[in-house]
Image (spheres, rainbow, N blue to C red):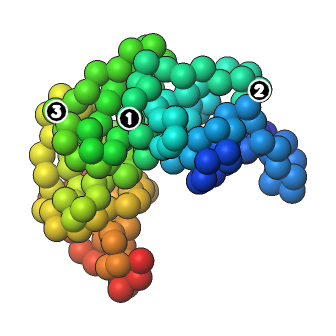
Amino acid sequence: IKNNIIFAGSYGTGNGVYRSLDGGNTWFQTSLNFASVGALAVSGNTVFAGAISPTSGVYLSTDNGASWTQTSLNNRSVYSLYINENTIYAGTDGYGVYVSTNSGLSWSQTSLNNKTVMALAVKGNLIFAGTAFEQGVFLSSDNGATWTQTSLNNQSAWVLAVNGNNIFVGVGSNGVYKSTDNGTTWYPTSLINQE
């Protein structure tokens, strides 16, 4: 959501990004209409979109989706985006996490460089990356320079969310896990055996 505009990414060639100006009652396709979009994020006046296929990478729009520009991260499928102050993190398919500190002008691959990153979340100075293929959740405390695997290391982590001191992760077909100690330990919630 940017101001009163809701953006939605859609899957399937020719779908791309839609926007609604009336709280979701009506939707209009933006000019990013040629790729599946796996992630959206907003920073100030800029909307970022992570594209999966057939044209992958990160796109940005400064005019509410009327036009889009592909950034230099243009050859990776992007499943997750997270913006923390002036830093943009992009989770990619098989190439880990990329980071940009200049609004997507340039990107650097972090040391988490060989995983499919489906989800990203930030808690204070900690970055969490949820990975596919039962590789679990990774943690960085230095803006992505180094990463440590948390104790949740045998699940596919599809979604991450931070609420206060709690970190939640949706895992494969095993429901939702929760950590209250920054990923040192994880406990299954009452929502189990759900995909």
- Residue 79 on image: x %, y %: 43, 46
Q: Do labels 1 and 3 touch, CB within 8 Å?
A: no
Label 1 vs 3, first from the N-terminus: 1
Q: Quadrant of residue 181?
A: bottom left
Between 164 and 81, the residue placed more toward the observer is 81
Q: Residues within 10 Å of mark 1 (few under 14, many from 20)?
A: many
Query: How many numbered discs?
Result: 3
Inter-mark Cα distance, 2 to 3: 35 Å
- Residue 182 on image: x %, y %: 23, 54
Q: Secondary structure at mark 3?
A: loop
Q: Residue type at mark 2: give it.
A: Ala
Mark seen at residue 76: 1
Q: Quadrant of residue 88?
A: top left
- Residue 111 on image: x %, y %: 16, 32
In this image, 64 relative to 149: left or right? right
Please state which of the two labelled residues, at mark 1 or mark 2, is closer to the viewer.
1
What residue is pinned by disc 3?
Answer: 111
What residue appears at the point 36 percent right and 41 percent down from the top-left corner? Answer: 91
Visible in this render: residue 46? no
Relative to 33, say whether 11 is above or below. below
Relative to 139, say whether 75 is above or below. above
Mark seen at residue 66: 2
Please state which of the two labelled residues, at mark 1 or mark 3, is closer to the viewer.
1
What residue appears at the point 52 percent right and 35 percent down from the top-left corner? Answer: 55
Q: Secondary structure at mark 2?
A: loop
Inter-mark Cα distance, 1 to 2: 23 Å
In this image, 16 relative to 190: left or right? right
Q: Residue type at mark 1: give it.
A: Arg
Q: Residue type at mark 3: give it.
A: Ser
Label 2 vs 3, first from the N-terminus: 2
What residue appears at the point 73 percent right and 31 percent down from the top-left corner? Answer: 31
